[in-house]
Each structure stands twice: as structure tokens, then as C-alpha cells.
Image (tube, helix red, strand yellow):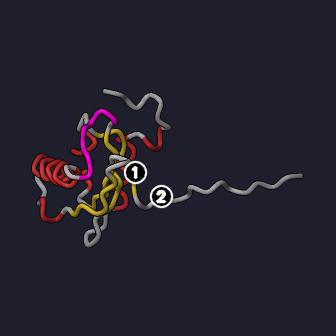
Amino acid sequence: MPDDRDTTPQWQKETVVEEMRRQALPDRPPTAQVFLEASVEVDSNSMEEFARKMVEDAAAKSHTQAAESHIGKLHPLAKSFSVTADPEVFAEIAKSPSVKSILPSEIHDIYPKPFESD
């Protein structure tokens, strides 16, 4: 299983889960894109079922309601899918060896900052 050693610290799964916890509001759970490892064998026919099972299992392990989680767009070629869920569901998803990375849908401050030149 690949690890996060080559990943920029702000995009490591644990850091992203912490960001998801910060973004969560009582009436609006955060959304993120989940990317699967290249070794995971899913295609356009099996992606929805794979994502649904992963989210249901993560909800059960985190003691949250699976019905409160929502799977959005599926991208079989990129082996990714969008999820809106309680942050603790993302914490469980991040533990899966099938997950390569998780990126929050809301990313603040990604543009380079201008600097003054003399």
C-alpha cells in the first residue's frame, strides 16, 4: 500500500480529514472527492456499487447514519467519486487501503499570492 511520504503535507489524508472537520457545519456536511488506488479494479459498471459500499461501511464504523451520506458524481476513468458526509465518515474512508487520496471540494487559498518587486 502506498503511503503519504511523497504527498505535500497539506494534502495527506489525515490533514484533509482535519480540514473536513473544520468545514463541517451542523446543517451542512462537507463534500470531498475520493480517489482510489490504481490497483483497485472498478469500471463504469461497478463504480457506483463500490462507492456505495465504501461509504456505508465507513458510516457504520464511524457510528453515523449512512442515509446522511450522499454519493455525488462518479468518475470511473479517474477512479474517483464525490461524497458529502459527516467528517468521521471521511476519517474511516481515509483508512481504507483502496483510497489513494481525498481532496475537499472547498479549497481556500490555492492561488499564488502576488508579491511586490522592487
Q: Determine which quarter of the picture holds residue 41.
A: top left
Chain part drawn in magenta: 38-44
Circle 1 SS class: strand
Q: Main secondary structure of the magenta part?
A: loop
Q: Residue 35: where, in percent of width, then height? A: 34, 46
- What residue is drawn where x is 32% and y is 37%? 37
Q: Residue 58: where, in percent of width, then height? A: 16, 48
Q: Residue 53: where, in percent of width, then height? A: 14, 50
User: Nearest the camera: 85 or 15?
Assistant: 85
- Tell me whether circle 1 and circle 2 mark residues in contact (CB < 8 Å): yes
- What residue is drawn where x is 31% and y is 50%? 76
Say left or right for 45 vs 118: left
Q: Residues within 10 Å of mark 1 (few under 14, many from 20)?
A: some
Q: Which residue is mark 1?
A: 103
- Residue closest to the far right: 118
- What residue is drawn where x is 47% and y is 58%? 107
Question: What's the mark number on residue 107?
Answer: 2
Question: What's the mark number on residue 71?
Answer: none
| The N terminus, quarter of image | top left
In the figure, 99 relative to 77: above or below?
A: above
Q: Residues within 10 Å of mark 2 (few under 14, many from 20)?
A: few
In the figure, 5 relative to 110: above or below?
A: above
What amino acid does circle 1 point to? Leu
Indicate yes or no whether the magenta region holds residue 62: no
